[in-house]
Amino acid sequence: MDNITFANIKNNEYLKNQLKSGEFAHFMLFVGQEGIGKEDSALEFAKVVLCEKRSDEACLSCRNCKLTNTGNHPDLLRVGGEGAIKITEIRDIQKNLFLKPYQAKYKVAIIKDAHFLTEESANAMLKVLEEPPENSIIIMTVSDKTLLPGTIVSRSQVVNFGIALKAQYSQVDEQELKMILGKESRVYEKFSLVQKYAKDKSLVKDLLDSLEVNLRSRLLQGQDNERNIIKLLELVQRSRGYLRANVSAKFVLENLVLNMGVLWQKL
């Protein structure tokens, strides 16, 4: 785990006080730009909560910490990060949260990229938040809280992570970005553009970040059809997953461009 993620927790008075007191909010919304570390911080927070030593830091050596590290802790539930969050996933979390913890004192659910909740899954989630189960902690992550229904935000304790410094200095040319996203741009032109970014993984990440920021801006401003923008955002998120799986950057970007083209043709 990157040290900066735990620093995010220790430098936040609200989170730090919860860990010291052992009294936790039922529902928190971690808000911050892509790359700021909010998802890793949510996992680190969960690790401390589940740790057997009951301190303000995870011991890393107890059985609970080891299970959390391997992704096998029965009291840690995780969904999201791979496009639309389906109602079946939320119902599974709902059912699991209302059961007693298997091994730890609490159950922790982390919902990554909560703006991908469908209308049905958001309504199902709202029912959980209206009467949160005892000994449960729910953490949602999102880049901008305005992307979530107000009924969900109003029930949350918002924890702001701010803006990633690196993201303020994007190396992506605005005109090139518009061409990549353009409905009328030819595929061979887009392929030619993305070749430049495929040479460096940091450039690929910058491009995906810029695409996401642009699309979310359109979503907030009501540009285009909301469902279409969400589908495009899902393509960007899928591309991030391919990169994390060490798929070739060239393949990732070319695949993204092709799928965007197919999507535009269907709309």
Image (cartoon, rainbow, N blue to C red):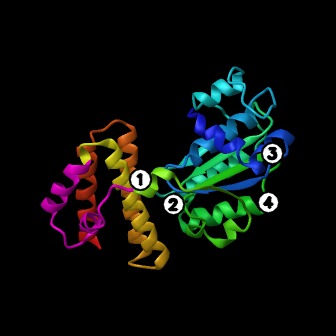
Kind of residue indicated by mark 3: Gln
On the image, the x and y values in percent for residue 1 come to 57, 32
Q: Which residue is mark 4?
A: 131
Disc 3 or 4, which lies upstream in sequence? 3
Q: As rendered, which of 45 and 108 lies closer to the eye?
A: 45
Q: Residues within 10 Å of mark 1 (few under 14, many from 20)?
A: some
Residue at 64 percent of width and 66 percent of height: 123
On the image, the x and y values in percent for residue 111 come to 60, 51
Disc 3 or 1, which lies upstream in sequence? 3
Query: How far apart in space, not on screen, are marks 3 and 4 (Cα)?
Result: 21 Å
Q: Secondary structure at mark 2?
A: helix
Q: Secondary structure at mark 1?
A: helix
> In the rendering, which numbered label is found on residue 116?
2
Residue at 42 percent of width and 73 percent of height: 218
Q: Specify whether residue 195 is painted magenta.
A: yes
Residue at 47 percent of width and 78 percent of height: 221
